[in-house]
Image (spheres, grey):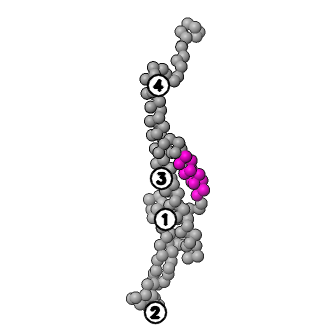
Amino acid sequence: MGLEELERRQAELKERLSNVGDMRRGSLVARYRKCGKASCCCAEEQHAGHGPSLSLTWQAEGKTRTKIIPVEAAEHTKAQITEFRRFRRLCRELVEVSERLCDARLESEQAEAQATAKKGGSKKSSLRRSSRRLRR
């Protein structure tokens, strides 16, 4: 990819990041539990148990956190998790493009400096410094 193409891709990724919606990290798991009552249908061996009970699980500050999500909010929560994953993917891609762009700019500057050195000139004009006596 050329310099202009990398700059265009970087601008596109920044635009896409600015349009990120509500998000939350973690994963949503459906759980089925047995209540423990001997007379309940869940006590039968082939019965899966009561549920589903949806649990959102994520890591925070070195600990695993869990939050029960109402079944009615499952689709909304899944969309938020998907949005977070999209956000992370966009961030990774933006960093990769930015690194490539920095490398390309560095190579361009080095090539420019070498070309200028071959010509025997310098891009910057040299400024003569006055002697100490004149500055007083």
Residue range (magenta): 8-20
The residue positioned farthest toward the left in the image shown: 45
Q: Amino acid at mark 2?
A: Ser
Between residues 50 and 77, which one lies in front from this camera angle? 77
Q: Amino acid at mark 4?
A: Thr
The mark closer to the camera, 4 or 3, is: 4
The residue positioned farthest toward the bottom in the image shown: 39
| Residue where numbered disc 3 is placed | 92
| Residue where numbered disc 1 is placed | 26
The crowding category of the residue bearing disc 1, from other C-alpha atoms within 10 Å (few below 14, some 14 to 19, many at least 20), is many
- For marks 2 and 1, give the CA distance: 36 Å
The mark closer to the camera, 1 or 3, is: 3
Looking at the image, tell me whether mark 1 or mark 3 is earlier in sequence order. 1
Is 46 located above or below residue 113 in the figure?
below
Q: Position of residue 33 (x, y in %)?
A: 45, 81
Between residues 123 and 56, which one lies in front from this camera angle? 123
Q: Secondary structure at mark 2?
A: loop
| Residue where numbered disc 2 is placed | 39
| Residue where numbered disc 4 is placed | 116
Q: Position of residue 68 (x, y in %)?
A: 53, 72
Looking at the image, tell me whether mark 4 or mark 3 is earlier in sequence order. 3
Q: Secondary structure at mark 4?
A: helix
Between residues 129 and 42, which one lies in front from this camera angle? 129
**Residue 30 in sight in this render:** yes
Cβ–Cβ below 8 Å for labels 4 and 3?
no
